């Protein structure tokens, strides 16, 4: 199995039809026990988190009960990518003295599961330019439009934002530091219609509970801001991307080659030590 270092796009369009029949293109079913063990091992780990594979792992894990050769090929592609990027990791710089507040990005992949009619929710929160919280999951409700799916994704991101703000407030108050939750948290979204509806209030046809973001904006806890789709880091968690876009977003969430960072830092320390002597 040769390693790869470029961006990848695992495209798996379910192997079952709407009535549950198997797709003729799926020639054989792989041993689901082996597939389940491997896909479970690819899930996020607390020691070495890899948010760049969150979407692909979530997509392939849906077929753990009855995987086929197509799904196993996708798993092997992820393993090759990890093998080629073993030195990649989230880099949190110690040189940031005045750490900025958290910044959120939310997005939705409309009809990522065409068989069940469900979309994909993705969000990521960064602090100092590096991801600290992220999620990629299939929505449990059937969205009637792309705008509806964006509202559902923004709702989930808002809930996570409230928890992050409360955790940061608790840590800073425990350490006798000034509060950093006096200003609203920026939550970036690329859908203009979704932002207009969230700002305007409740609309017919969508459950009021999904307008929790609207209440948070009124209380000045968050501020939804429109950005260009190409600048939305949450795209990494909702859809398959071209190589150049994938690499740009991976760099945007703070994934770096840690070996190079450590070697550069050691060389700087040696240089400072020689100047002192």
Image (spheres, rainbow, N blue to C red):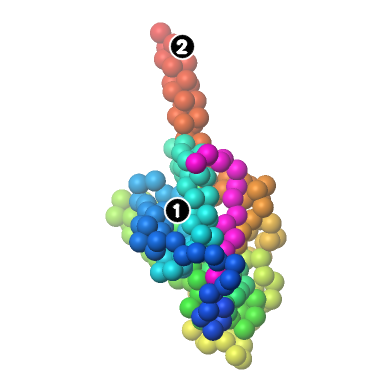
Q: Residue at x 50, y 64 (%)?
A: 28
Mark 1 neighbour class, 10 Å CA radius: few under 14, some 14 to 19, many 20 or more: some
Mark 2 neighbour class, 10 Å CA radius: few under 14, some 14 to 19, many 20 or more: few
Place of residue 139 in the rendered image (x, y in percent of width and height, measured from the top left): 51, 75
Residue furthest top as drawn: 277
The residue lying toward the viewer, choosing from 131 and 272, is 131
The first of marks 1 and 2 along the sequence is 1
Residue 14 among magenta residues: yes
Place of residue 266 in the rendered image (x, y in percent of width and height, measured from the top left): 44, 23
Residues shaded magenta: 1-15
The prevailing secondary structure element of the residues shown in magenta is loop
Pair 1/2: label in front: 1
The residue lying toward the viewer, choosing from 2 and 93, is 2
Residue pointed to by mark 2: 275
- For residue 183, say whether it is visible: no
Quarter assignment of residue 150: bottom right
Against 30, residue 17 (above or below) is: below
Q: Secondary structure at mark 2?
A: helix
Q: Quadrant of the C terminus?
A: top left
Residue pointed to by mark 1: 132
């Amino acid at each position: 199995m040769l390693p790869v270092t470029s961006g990848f796009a695992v495209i798996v369009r379910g192997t079952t039809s709407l009535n549950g029949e198997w797709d003729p293109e799926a020639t054989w079913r792989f041993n689901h026990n082996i597939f389940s063990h491997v896909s479970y091992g690819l899930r996020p780990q607390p020691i070495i988190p890899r948010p760049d594979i969150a979407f692909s792992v979530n997509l392939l894990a849906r077929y753990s009960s009855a995987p086929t050769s197509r799904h196993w090929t996708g798993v092997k592609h992820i393993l090759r990518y990890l093998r080629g990027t073993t030195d990649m990791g989230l880099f949190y710089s110690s040189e940031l003295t005045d750490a900025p507040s958290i910044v959120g990005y939310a997005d939705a992949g409309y009809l990522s599961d065409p068989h069940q009619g469900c979309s994909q929710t993705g969000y990521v929160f960064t602090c100092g330019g590096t991801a600290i919280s992220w999620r990629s999951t299939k929505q449990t409700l059937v969205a009637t439009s792309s705008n509806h799916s964006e509202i559902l994704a923004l709702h989930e991101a808002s809930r996570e934002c409230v928890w992050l703000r409360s955790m940061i407030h608790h840590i800073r108050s425990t350490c006798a530091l000034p509060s950093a939750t006096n200003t609203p948290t920026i939550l970036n979204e690329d859908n203009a219609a979704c932002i207009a509806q969230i700002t305007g209030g409740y609309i017919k046809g969508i459950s009021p509970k999904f307008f929790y973001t609207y209440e948070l904006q009124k209380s000045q806890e968050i501020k939804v801001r429109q950005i260009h789709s190409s600048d939305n880091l949450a795209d990494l968690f909702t859809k398959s991307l071209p190589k150049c876009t994938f690499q740009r977003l991976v760099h945007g969430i703070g994934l770096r080659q840690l070996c190079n960072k450590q070697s550069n830092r050691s060389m700087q320390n040696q240089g400072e030590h020689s100047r002192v002597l």
